[in-house]
Image (cartoon, grey):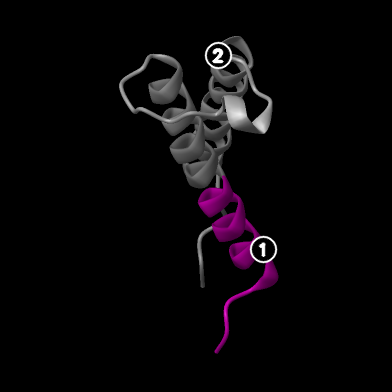
Amino acid sequence: MGKSPARTREFAFLISGLMDCLFGGILLLSWLNIIPLDLTEFGLTRGWVGLIGAVMAVSGVVVVTYQLTKLKEPDQ
Protein backbone atom coordinates (compact mmCIF):
# COMPACT_ATOMS: atom_id res chain seq x y z
CA MET A 1 0.00 0.00 0.00
CA GLY A 2 0.95 3.67 -0.07
CA LYS A 3 2.71 5.56 2.64
CA SER A 4 0.70 7.14 5.40
CA PRO A 5 0.31 10.94 5.42
CA ALA A 6 2.28 11.16 8.67
CA ARG A 7 5.29 9.36 7.13
CA THR A 8 5.11 11.57 4.04
CA ARG A 9 5.01 14.69 6.22
CA GLU A 10 8.02 13.46 8.24
CA PHE A 11 9.95 12.80 5.03
CA ALA A 12 9.07 16.27 3.70
CA PHE A 13 10.30 17.92 6.92
CA LEU A 14 13.50 15.86 6.76
CA ILE A 15 14.20 16.94 3.17
CA SER A 16 13.36 20.55 4.04
CA GLY A 17 15.77 20.53 6.98
CA LEU A 18 18.53 19.01 4.87
CA MET A 19 18.03 21.67 2.19
CA ASP A 20 18.19 24.41 4.83
CA CYS A 21 21.47 22.94 6.08
CA LEU A 22 22.84 22.84 2.55
CA PHE A 23 21.85 26.39 1.57
CA GLY A 24 22.85 27.79 4.96
CA GLY A 25 26.22 26.10 4.66
CA ILE A 26 26.74 27.55 1.19
CA LEU A 27 25.92 31.04 2.48
CA LEU A 28 28.28 30.60 5.43
CA LEU A 29 31.07 29.42 3.13
CA SER A 30 30.42 32.46 0.96
CA TRP A 31 30.56 34.70 4.04
CA LEU A 32 33.92 33.18 4.98
CA ASN A 33 35.18 33.77 1.39
CA ILE A 34 35.75 30.04 0.84
CA ILE A 35 33.24 30.02 -2.02
CA PRO A 36 33.56 33.10 -4.23
CA LEU A 37 29.91 34.14 -4.57
CA ASP A 38 29.11 37.79 -5.19
CA LEU A 39 25.79 38.32 -3.43
CA THR A 40 26.11 42.12 -3.28
CA GLU A 41 24.34 42.37 -6.63
CA PHE A 42 21.23 41.08 -4.86
CA GLY A 43 21.49 43.83 -2.25
CA LEU A 44 22.94 41.65 0.52
CA THR A 45 25.97 42.76 2.50
CA ARG A 46 28.46 40.25 3.89
CA GLY A 47 27.00 40.64 7.38
CA TRP A 48 23.48 39.78 6.22
CA VAL A 49 24.77 36.81 4.23
CA GLY A 50 26.49 35.45 7.34
CA LEU A 51 23.44 36.02 9.51
CA ILE A 52 21.01 34.43 7.05
CA GLY A 53 23.38 31.50 6.47
CA ALA A 54 23.80 30.89 10.20
CA VAL A 55 20.06 31.00 10.87
CA MET A 56 19.31 28.65 7.98
CA ALA A 57 22.05 26.19 8.95
CA VAL A 58 21.08 26.10 12.63
CA SER A 59 17.35 25.79 11.91
CA GLY A 60 18.05 23.01 9.41
CA VAL A 61 20.12 21.10 11.95
CA VAL A 62 17.35 21.49 14.54
CA VAL A 63 14.66 20.20 12.16
CA VAL A 64 16.76 17.24 10.97
CA THR A 65 17.77 16.34 14.52
CA TYR A 66 14.17 16.44 15.69
CA GLN A 67 12.92 14.36 12.77
CA LEU A 68 15.60 11.70 13.28
CA THR A 69 15.29 11.42 17.07
CA LYS A 70 11.57 11.74 17.81
CA LEU A 71 9.79 8.71 19.17
CA LYS A 72 7.89 6.75 16.54
CA GLU A 73 5.18 4.18 16.97
CA PRO A 74 6.24 0.79 15.64
CA ASP A 75 4.84 -0.11 12.22
CA GLN A 76 2.53 -3.09 12.15
Residue 45 to residue 56: above or below: above
Give the camera-side residue of 64 and 34. 34
Q: Mark 2 points at which residue?
A: 46
Name which of mark 1 and mark 2 comes first in the sequence. Answer: 1
The residue at 62%/16% (across/down) is: 45
Q: What stretch is highlighted in magenta?
A: 1-16
- Label 2: how many residues lie within 10 Å, few (<14), some (14-19) or many (20+)? some
Q: Quadrant of the N terminus?
A: bottom right
In the rendered image, residue 2, in percent from the top left (x then y), is placed at 57, 85
In the rendered image, residue 15, in percent from the top left (x then y), is placed at 52, 53
Secondary structure of the residue carrying numbered label 2: helix
Give the camera-side residue of 50 and 64. 50
Identify the image quadrant of residue 31: top left
Disc sitting over residue 68 in the figure: none
Please say whether residue 69 is visible from this viewpoint. Answer: no
Q: Name the residue under label 1.
A: 6
The question of residue 15 being in magenta is answered with: yes
The question of residue 64 being in magenta is answered with: no
